[in-house]
Amino acid sequence: MGIHPSWSVLAGAACVFALLLLAQPSLASTPAPAPVVLAAAAPQATAEAPQPPSLPRGVDPPSESLVGTFTATIQTWDASATAVRMDQAEAMHDLLAAGLGWKSSGHCVDADRRTCTSLEDIRYGTLMQAIDLKYASGCPITVTGGTEKGHAGGRFSHGHGFKVDIAHNACVDSYITRTYRFWKVRGDGADLFRPPPMPGSRPALDVYADEPTHWDILFR
């Protein structure tokens, strides 16, 4: 004998099913999940910050500098202070801060010792023009002689703060001999170079002497 469901049971089941459908949220109305944004982690610095150059023995870093912070431009210094004399610590600070090198066979800065390389009482204009040479040429510049004893005397001498010696290198040798004009041969055989005359300007009195181990430079 077959079982035949009554119409009332079927109708009840249909009503329950319809109620269940109405109770479910509409798929069309369900908001899409918010996108996940991955923020890139900030790169971690792996290299240590550059340290200032170490000063030679006997030199303490000064609290202030006559020059201040240098920029890679020429003639950023105070021309009215050309004749100002600088002490050792101040001059060394500005030399190294501008990216120039310093060398002494005796590893010292005592102006009374021939093997030292001293900047005591160097003229502000002399030091600034040495720095200008670095910026103008783009070459490494290393000062090997300053105001220490052992140089020739005279009014415009090392001892009076007008001259510096800088080490030879291919870059600066090429720059000086290409940029400045050959003038004459000095009594000791050194070739002398001077800046070419500029129209409307006073003749430059700087002299670059090509000695065997260095350039002997007079900045006036």
Image: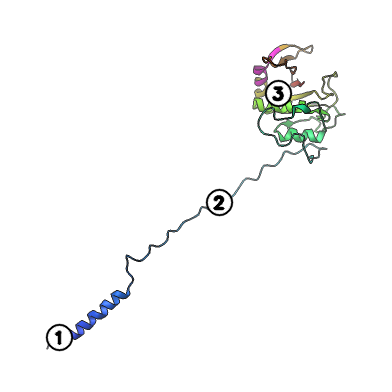
Closer to us: mark 3 or mark 2? 2
> How many numbered badges does the structure rendering display?
3
> Which residue is pictured at 85% across the width and 19% down the height?
155
Category of crowding for the residue at label 1, using alpha-carbon neighbours closer than 10 angstroms: few (below 14), some (14–19), many (at least 20): few
Indicate whether 61 appears above or below 116: below
Residue type at the position of mark 2: Ala
Residue farthest toward the front in the current orientation of the protein: 200
x and y percentages locating residue 117 in the rendered image: 80, 29
Residue farthest toward the left in the current orientation of the protein: 1
Residue type at the position of mark 1: His
Q: Residue 42 bears which disc, if any?
A: 2
Q: Mark 3 points at which residue?
A: 168
Category of crowding for the residue at label 3, using alpha-carbon neighbours closer than 10 angstroms: few (below 14), some (14–19), many (at least 20): some
Category of crowding for the residue at label 2, using alpha-carbon neighbours closer than 10 angstroms: few (below 14), some (14–19), many (at least 20): few
Looking at the image, is mark 1 or mark 2 earlier in the sequence?
1
x and y percentages locating residue 215 in the rendered image: 74, 21
Q: Mark 1 points at which residue?
A: 4
Residue bounds of the magenta highlight: 175-182
Element at label 2: loop
Whether the residues at callouts 1 and 3 have beta carbons within 8 Å, the answer is no
Report the quarter where the C terminus lies. top right
Query: In the picture, residue 99 is in which quadrant?
Result: top right
Q: Is residue 174 located in the magenta-colored stretch of the structure?
A: no
